[in-house]
Image (spheres, rainbow, N blue to C red):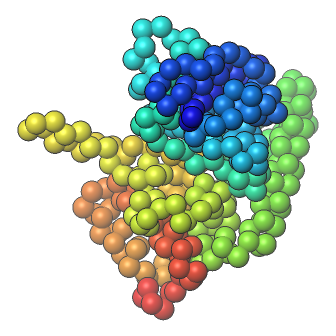
């Protein structure tokens, strides 16, 4: 016989449902959310499992990779897709969710999510850590900017890279300001040191990766954007066409069509938000800083005159994603001579 398994995973326990080919429940229960316990449960109650389904989540990658190593037929289901079916039940419980996931993999009505490998996950963790420290740095600097004005120590413009040095120099002029600012300045220096540490690690990864180095030949693409794109896509062969990458990263317009209504809205913003934001920054660099002529820049500037800078930036970001995927798939580099 053939069975289908649904896992509703939480941090402590996982609800398990095993269905046979006809949809009848063979087993229901709970086990600890540890890879070994879940694998043992499958071996005991669903040794003939055709598919094992679990939703994307914090521990999904860990469980997915462990089951792959154990050679179990596991699939990771898009949470938004599964939610449409699971929310239709009148009572939402872990038991019902596990049964709903088992039903999804039994009938085949699901969208499989891509699960990152260990290497891509490690790179992405470094990028996320750096991004978090940048947000902390911005918060600390803005706090100091407000303070120097309240204390009347700096009444001129406080923007620019030299502000931290100016704020530190003002400590000797007011004891009350010094008592407030010294701890913040100490934390800010530590944050800046750790950001530089992240940068060194990420640059070393970029230098050691031939694909990332080729992606960096595209104008406007630095090591951060290339690494974010590389760790998000991971395998270019999973896209039939390079044009599909734009939709995967949420850079295509949302379409609402019903009867005579046909409306095109803003971009969908699905997929990885960090990679999308880096592509936006790269597009802005192409439109405002790159002076060497390329067809992409010329097209973006014409689009800016026609639709405005924001829409042009989104369009150029989508083009960049398509171009980077094509370069990755073809094993080529960006050629300035051919572009000109």
Q: Nearer the viewer, residue 301 or 315?
A: 315
Instruction: Give the quarter of the image for residue 50.
Output: top right
200 vs 160, nearest the viewer:
200
The correct choice, above or below, for 252 with respect to 74 in the image is: below
Residue 133 drawn at (x, y percent)? 76, 42
The foreground one among 259 and 180 is 259
Quadrant position of the N terminus in the picture: top right
In percent of width and height, residue 340 lies at 42, 88
| Residue 335 shows in the view | yes
Q: Quadrant of residue 232 in the image?
A: bottom right
Residue closest to the far front: 1
Q: Residue at x 83, y 60 (%)?
A: 201
**Hey, which residue is sitting farthest top in the picture?**
91
Q: Nearer the viewer, residue 191 or 227?
A: 227
Q: Position of residue 204 (x, y in %)?
A: 81, 67
Going 52% across and 69% down the picture, which residue do you hit?
324
Residue 56 occupies quadrant: top right
**Residue located 39% across and 17% down the image:** 88
* Count of number-bearing discs: 0
Residue 284 appearing in the image = no
Q: Residue at x 60, y 72 (%)?
A: 215
């Amino acid at each position: 016989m053939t069975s289908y398994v649904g896992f509703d995973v939480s941090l402590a326990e996982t609800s398990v449902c095993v269905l046979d080919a006809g949809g009848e429940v063979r087993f229901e229960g709970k086990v600890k959310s540890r890879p070994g316990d879940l694998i043992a449960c499958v071996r005991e109650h669903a040794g003939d499992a055709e598919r094992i389904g679990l939703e994307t989540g914090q521990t999904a990658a860990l469980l997915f990779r462990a089951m792959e190593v154990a050679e179990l037929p596991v699939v990771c289901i898009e949470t938004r897709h599964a939610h449409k079916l699971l929310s239709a039940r009148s009572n939402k419980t872990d038991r019902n969710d596990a049964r709903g996931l088992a039903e999804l993999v039994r009938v085949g009505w699901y969208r499989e999510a891509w699960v990152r490998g260990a290497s891509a996950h490690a790179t992405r963790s470094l990028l996320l850590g750096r991004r978090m420290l940048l947000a902390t740095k911005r918060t600390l600097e803005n706090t100091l900017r407000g303070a120097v004005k309240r204390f009347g120590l700096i009444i001129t413009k406080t923007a620019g890279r030299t502000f931290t040095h100016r704020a530190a120099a003002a400590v000797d002029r007011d004891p009350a300001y010094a008592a407030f600012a010294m701890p913040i300045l100490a934390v800010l220096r530590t944050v800046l040191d750790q950001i530089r540490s992240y940068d060194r690690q990420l640059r070393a990864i970029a230098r050691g990766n031939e694909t990332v180095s080729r992606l960096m030949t595209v104008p406007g693409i630095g090591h951060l954007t290339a690494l974010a794109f590389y760790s998000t896509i991971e395998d270019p062969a999973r896209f039939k066409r390079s044009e599909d990458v734009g939709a995967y990263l949420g850079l295509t317009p949302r379409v609402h069509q019903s009867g005579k209504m046909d409306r095109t809205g803003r971009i969908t913003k699905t997929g990885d938000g960090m990679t999308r934001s880096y592509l936006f920054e790269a597009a802005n660099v192409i439109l405002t800083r790159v002076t060497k002529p390329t067809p992409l820049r010329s097209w973006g500037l014409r689009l800016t005159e026609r639709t405005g800078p924001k829409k042009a930036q989104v369009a150029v970001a989508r083009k960049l994603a398509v171009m980077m995927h094509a370069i990755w798939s073809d094993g080529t580099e960006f050629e300035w001579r051919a572009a000109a």
